[in-house]
């Protein structure tokens, strides 16, 4: 996790991360460049934690719609081919980023960043709503893009979008829900890899968390 270092009586700050940095003019937001592929991301502060404000788009290869638990896999929603440049040209790549199985997610973040642990996720959620935690999901969701009873308010600039996921070789829940892996992993009762994930949707104000088998493909936010 990176910390904001204030200098010159708060007139400037430096975000410690990989690649070039700058400000985007938003309140408390910064930008950084992933030197592996040139993608530029916004980053925001959530109670002392620096989070990516966009889903990760790192795509070294693409595996269509095929789930796998034994090797890292990378997916773009509704793309079933194997051409990286073709996948990058889709609207889904630009808008919702890449979906990663757990093995891919664990190694996907740029140098100087990492996949947040369960404890880091829980800290952010608790700090957003320290009394009950029940409004955290709504406060993290982007404005104007969510269907459902509870529109996002995006209090922190996290800008969560409903990017869906991949399971059983099928893309699901686009425009309905967002899912992100944490770095907390383990094994199920069969000894298969599983991980802890977090999710939000437009029908609730909460952030949900649970365990899922490692072949599922979810979005990634680095910290």
Image: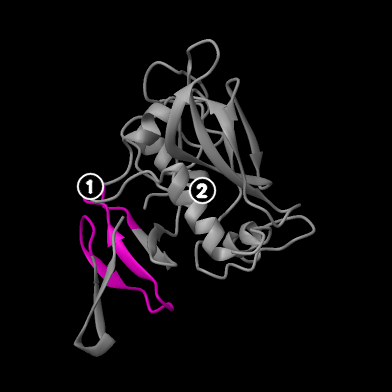
Q: Residue furthest top?
A: 190
| Residue 7 placement, left or right of 169 | left
In the image, residue 90 above or below residue 194: below
* Disc 2 + disc 1, Cβ < 8 Å: no
Does the magenta-highlighted stretch encompass residue 22?
yes
In the image, residue 70 above or below residue 42: above
Along the viewing direction, whichever of 159 and 175 lies nearer the viewer: 159
User: Residue at coordinates 33% horizontally, 38% vertically from top-left?
Assistant: 108
Does the magenta-highlighted stretch encompass residue 172?
no
Give x and y (percent) for residue 196: 51, 35
Instruction: Give the colouring mode of the picture.
Output: one colour
Front disc: 2 or 1: 1
- The residue where tag 2 is placed is 96
User: Residue at coordinates 53% horizontally, 18% vertically from top-left?
Assistant: 188
Magenta span of residues: 16-40
Give x and y (percent) for residue 69: 45, 18
Which label was assigned to residue 222? none
Badge count: 2
Q: Earlier in the sequence, mark 2 or mark 1?
A: 2
User: Does the rendering let one see residue 74?
Assistant: no
Give x and y (percent) for residue 197: 53, 38
User: Residue at coordinates 29% horizontally, 59% vertically from top-left?
Assistant: 2
User: Does the rendering let one see residue 135?
Assistant: yes
Dot 2: element: helix
**Quadrant in which residue 41 is drawn:** bottom left
Alpha-carbon neighbours of circle 1 within 10 Å: few (<14), some, or many (≥20)? Answer: few
- The residue where tag 1 is placed is 111
Most common secondary structure along the magenta stretch: loop
| Residue 178 placement, left or right of 73 | right
User: Residue at coordinates 66% horizontally, 39% vertically from top-left?
Assistant: 173
Alpha-carbon neighbours of circle 2 within 10 Å: few (<14), some, or many (≥20)? Answer: many
């Amino acid at each position: 996790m990176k910390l904001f270092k204030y200098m010159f009586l708060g007139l400037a700050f430096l975000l410690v991360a990989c690649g070039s940095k700058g400000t985007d003019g938003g309140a408390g937001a910064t930008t950084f460049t992933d030197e592996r592929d040139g993608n530029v991301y916004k980053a925001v502060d959530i109670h002392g934690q620096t989070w990516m404000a966009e889903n990760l788009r790192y795509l070294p290869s693409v595996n269509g719609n095929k789930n796998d638990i034994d090797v890292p896999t990378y997916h773009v929603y509704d793309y079933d081919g194997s051409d990286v440049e073709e996948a990058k040209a889709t609207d889904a790549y630009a808008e919702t980023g890449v979906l990663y199985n757990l093995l891919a997610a664990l190694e996907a973040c740029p140098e100087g960043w990492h996949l947040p642990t369960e404890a880091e996720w829980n800290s952010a959620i608790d700090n957003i709503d320290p009394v009950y935690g029940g409004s955290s999901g709504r406060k993290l969701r982007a404005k104007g893009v969510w269907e459902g009873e509870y529109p996002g308010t995006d209090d922190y600039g996290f800008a969560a979008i409903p990017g869906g996921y991949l399971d059983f070789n099928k893309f699901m829940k686009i425009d309905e829900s967002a899912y992100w892996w944490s770095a907390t992993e383990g094994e199920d009762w069969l000894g298969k890899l599983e991980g802890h994930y977090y999710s939000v949707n437009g029908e609730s104000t909460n952030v949900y968390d649970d365990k899922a088998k490692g072949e599922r493909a979810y979005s990634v936010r680095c910290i």
